[in-house]
Amino acid sequence: MSQPNLQEIKDISILLDQIEEYKHLIDSANIQLQNTKEYYKSLESVEKSKIYNDLKQKSNLIQLNNDIQEYRKQEMNQKISIISDLNNYFDDFFESDEAKTIIVDVIKTFKDEPYEVYCDSKYQSILSPGQNYKKTTEGNIRICSETKEYTLDPKYLNPLVFEQLLISAASEN
């Protein structure tokens, strides 16, 4: 075998330098690849965290919406209960002697003036026996003449207001 000549040694030296340079580039590329992987892992973690937080927030909003609906449902049930209690109270009131007295007092305010009584049939027991009235389905008692009218309506007035109306009607006459 012959000894390598100087040109071959130079070429081999250049190749070794290039190999070393490529090796350095490959190491650098591997470091960049590792950094990129870690970067994407951190992005993935951040994205997962963001998705988790978004889902948690949506879950909280859904729960809040459910709580609001439940509150509204309870509020509606409470209103229904109050209305039912109030209707029972007025039904009881209209069956009482006090209500009969109020009607008699209202009728007295009409003096000799002709009047008509309109009464929902569920309140007819409040009228004096033999009292003529015209049936209505308005849920109230209305007494009227050509010049004045009194309506006793349990949906809008309570007994104390009835009394105040009677006192003011009596003072007008």
Image (spheres, rainbow, N blue to C red):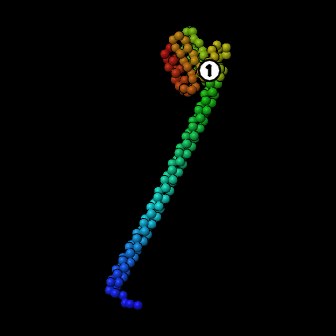
Residue 43 shows in the view = yes
Residue 126 shows in the view = no
Q: Is residue 31 toward the left or the right of residue 154 in the image?
A: left
Above-or-below relation of 110 to 15: above
Above-or-below relation of 168 to 55: above
Q: Residue at x 40, y 76 (%)?
A: 23
Residue 95 location, quadrant: top right
Which is nearer the eye, 15 or 93?
Answer: 15
Residue 13 location, quadrant: bottom left
Q: Secondary structure at mark 1?
A: loop
How many marks overall?
1
Q: Residue at x 37, y 90 (%)?
A: 3
Which is nearer the eye, 27 or 21?
Answer: 21
Residue 153 location, quadrant: top right
How crowded is the residue under tag 1: few (<14 C-alpha within 10 Å), some, or many (20+)? few
Q: Residue at x 59, y 21 (%)?
A: 138
Q: Position of residue 12 (x, y in %)?
A: 36, 82
The residue beneath circle 1 is 137
Q: Residue at x 59, y 38 (%)?
A: 77
Q: Position of residue 124 (x, y in %)?
A: 65, 19
Q: Position of residue 60 (x, y in %)?
A: 51, 50
Which is nearer the eye, 86 or 165?
Answer: 86
Above-or-below relation of 12 to 171: below
Q: Position of residue 11 (x, y in %)?
A: 34, 81
Q: Amino acid at mark 1?
A: Thr
Which is nearer the eye, 63 or 100?
Answer: 63
